[in-house]
Image (tube, rainbow, N blue to C red):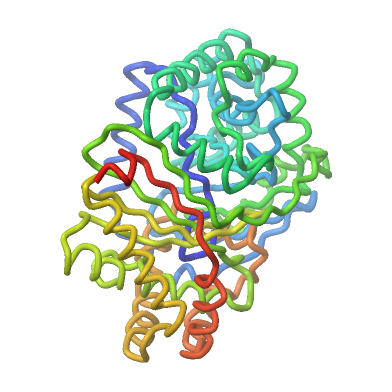
Amino acid sequence: MSLVLERMSGVPSPARGEGTVVRAIATLCFALFFLSLPALDARAAMNIQEVRSKKGVTAWMVEDHSIPLIAIRFVFDGGTAQDPVGKEGLVNLMTGLFDEGAGDLDSEAFQQKLDDAGAEISFQAARDGTYGWMRMLSDHKDEAFGLLKLTVNSPRFDQAPIDRIRSQILSGILANERDPNTVARQRWLRAIYGQHPYSRPDEGTKQSLATITAADIRAFHKANFARGGLHVAVVGDIDAATLSGKLDEVFGDLPQKQTLAPVEDVKLKLGQQLEVNYDLPQTSLQLAWPGVKPNARDFFAAALMNEILGGSTFTSRLFEEVREKRGLAYGVSSKLVDHEHSNALLVTTATRSDRAAETLSIVRKVVKDMAEKGPTEEELAATKKYLIGSFAINHLKSSDSIAATLVGLQRDNFAMDYIKNRAALIDAVSLEDVRTEARKLLSADPTVMIVGPPLNRY
């Protein structure tokens, strides 16, 4: 995670069955309990410890005994970009099966044990990683970590749950076949990524889902779940010595090395205009420029420039010109998108179809002005204060969010003192740094996608 952006792709986990009434009530109570808790003091997040187990499993930990909860997040390198050609959707399908039985527990028995332990568990497939998450009451940590051990090491991947989860994913694919946004998204990915794995649908296709077998899922699990590609963060009511033992219990018996297919870096294919024609009253616009890696030396210059351009909801230049002055859209925004093998700056908005050409012209003009002149001193000073001051609210507001932040830092190869040093790194960015970054990123000819009636209709 870039600490301004989430690294996750945003693709939802596969749909699950409704489960038992007991599980639903327990989940609701757990959620209400979390909502009633005060946010973890941001200062606690500065006290990050590195815990290394006897078997060499490393985790970043924030110890906090103020509430009886533990949150653990982890990610294995390698996500949906690892789907073999013709078996797209494999990793996404796999992540829907980890709470559908493990070890000697079938789906119903496993979920009952999870309820009894007062724990929640979830897995999610992203383009470059397979993510796992669990939160538990610390009084029941032995039972909860025991169930996590089973899911990580001994998932069952029984045929009945495979067929059920596959059917749920397929239903979503069929429902979206004529959805303009889904059609546009797939065309967009193919246009900017070409034949790269990023161009393929994370959820798979009707044809590819039908080819995926239990053996395929087991093979990927074996290749993916290894200590060498693992990043772990734990926050809450646990000490380092106890966590060390739990790390070995859950992850210590995994293979040392992953056996993943190589994935090449890919540059965005810019300078295209895509029109996805639908007779709609509102036209969606998306534009892509080059981005920057979150651990690059010029990242904060790019982040500050993006925030001024369109990152801030109500104070950005795009919002001022598109929404405030002209009322062309309810919202318009820009964001830096980070993937392991590609980066982008995206601008998105939606407007009345008869004013789409005008809106597109305004967006291009605002971006061109930023590329040529950059921000003002006043804009930069205000944005620095915002990025520094909002960090705790956006990334350190709960045990879960702190754990997610720490996992993201590890994936991006940041040091543990990054949070402590972040404000100084932002303050060190000069106006000329930001102007240079604006010229570097925004001078390119973007790829543009227009979803709605043809522009020449009006």
Q: Does residue 249 appear anywhere in the picture? A: yes
Judging depth in this view, the residue of 281 and 245 nearest the camera is 281
- The residue at 60%/18% (across/down) is 209
Q: Is residue 159 left or right of residue 392?
A: right
Judging depth in this view, the residue of 219 and 315 nearest the camera is 315
Image coords of residue 447 (percent x, y): 50, 54
Q: Is residue 297 left or right of residue 333?
A: right
Judging depth in this view, the residue of 257 and 243 nearest the camera is 257
- The residue at 46%/90% (across/down) is 431
Image coords of residue 217 (percent x, y): 69, 23
Q: Is residue 327 left or right of residue 250?
A: left
Q: Does residue 33 appear anywhere in the picture? A: no
Residue 248 occupies quadrant: top right
Judging depth in this view, the residue of 245 and 131 nearest the camera is 131
Image coords of residue 414 (percent x, y): 64, 68
Q: How many marks?
A: 0
Residue extending furthest toward the top: 160
**Up-down relation of residue 313 to residue 163 (above or below):** below
**Up-down relation of residue 225 to residue 413 (above or below):** above
If the image is split into quadrants, where does the N terminus sit?
Answer: bottom right
- The residue at 70%/48% (across/down) is 230
